[in-house]
Image (cartoon, coloured by chain):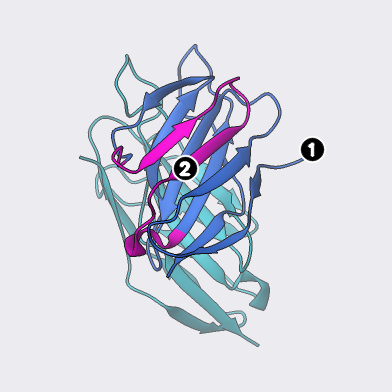
């Protein structure tokens, strides 16, 4: 079974330029997450989708960041314009969340996109 | 809000040494607890989990026990190998609840770098 796929793996851009990251979750997973991981820190949630609906975007800086998951499968995260402080690893994860409740199911992570803003 | 605190790193050990990485948490309700591992150049992988108090998660010789009274989830391994060298993250999830935006969100510690020498 293929894991979570992300592209590109690495991206170097100049500040004020736009950039986009793509994520394809594990087939059948209804929930998709974008996390930001700064150097030496743990990941922090940016946005969570249940199918095509963004159900938690409270940590997404909406002045420059946007995301979409139009068909409830793959997703794109965009930054426009990028700033120096956006240099980090952007992680995508997916899970199959059960409506019936209970303990949270496992989130599967992709390898991440390492962004460098010059 | 929720938070996870891991012991300061990095940790350097000789092969076959005993490993402990401390993790304490602050959360409302009854979170699920996780240890994730990140090998060089790879994505985060779930190492083990525990979903209620006194549960012990175990995998690949690693163990951690969910201690509600001390709000801790320390990671242990009796005999580490060179191949265990990685970054280890403790995390918690609110899991499922009656609505709310924390559904399925993972809160991570800052990570602990483990290096094992032959």
Sooner in the amino-acid sequence: mark 1 or mark 2: 1
- Residue tagged 1: A1
Q: Is residue B89 visible?
A: yes
Q: B15 and A39: which one is in front? A: A39
The picture quadrant where one finds residue A118 is bottom left
Q: Is A97 rendered above or below residue B109?
A: above
- Residue tagged 2: A78
Give the quadrant of the N terminus of chain A.
Answer: top right
Q: Give the chain letter at badge 1.
A: A
Q: Position of residue A13 (x, y in %)?
A: 49, 63
Q: Give the chain letter at badge 2.
A: A
Q: Is A44 rendered above or below residue A104?
A: below
Q: A61 and A18: which one is in front? A: A18
**Chain that is coloured blue in the picture:** A
Taking the spot 56% from the left edge, 55% from the top edge, the residue there is: A113
Q: Is residue A48 left or right of residue B78?
A: left
Taking the spot 49% from the left edge, 52% from the top edge, the residue there is: A90
The picture quadrant where one finds residue B117 is bottom right
* B33 within the magenta span: no
**Contact, CB < 8 Å: mark 1 with mark 2?**
no
Give chain B's shade. cyan
Residues drawn in magenta = A61-88
* A66 within the magenta span: yes
Q: Is residue B106 visible?
A: no
Tell me the crowding category of disc 1: few under 14, some 14 to 19, or many 20 or more residues within 10 angstroms, Cα based.
few
């Amino acid at each position: 079974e293929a894991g979570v796929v992300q592209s590109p793996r690495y991206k170097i851009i100049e500040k004020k330029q736009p950039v986009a990251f793509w994520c394809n979750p594990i087939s059948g997973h209804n929930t998709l997450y974008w996390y930001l991981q700064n150097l030496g820190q743990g990941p922090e949630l940016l946005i969570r989708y249940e199918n095509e609906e963004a159900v938690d975007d409270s940590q997404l800086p909406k002045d420059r960041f946007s995301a979409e998951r139009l068909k409830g499968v793959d997703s794109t995260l965009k930054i426009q314009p990028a700033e120096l402080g956006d240099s980090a690893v952007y992680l995508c994860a997916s899970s199959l969340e059960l409506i019936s409740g209970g303990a949270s199911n496992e989130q599967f992570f992709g390898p991440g996109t390492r962004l460098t803003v010059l | 809000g929720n938070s996870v605190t891991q012991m300061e790193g990095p940790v350097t050990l000789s092969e076959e040494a005993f490993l402990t990485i401390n993790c304490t948490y602050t959360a409302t309700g009854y979170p699920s607890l996780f240890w994730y591992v990140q090998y060089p150049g790879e994505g985060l992988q779930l190492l083990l989990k525990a979903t209620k108090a006194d549960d012990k998660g175990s995998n690949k010789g690693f163990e951690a026990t969910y201690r509600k009274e001390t709000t801790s989830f320390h990671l242990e391994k009796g005999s580490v190998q060179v191949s265990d060298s990685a970054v280890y993250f403790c995390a918690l999830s609110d899991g499922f609840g009656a609505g709310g935006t924390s559904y399925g969100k993972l809160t991570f510690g800052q990570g602990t770098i483990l290096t094992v020498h032959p």
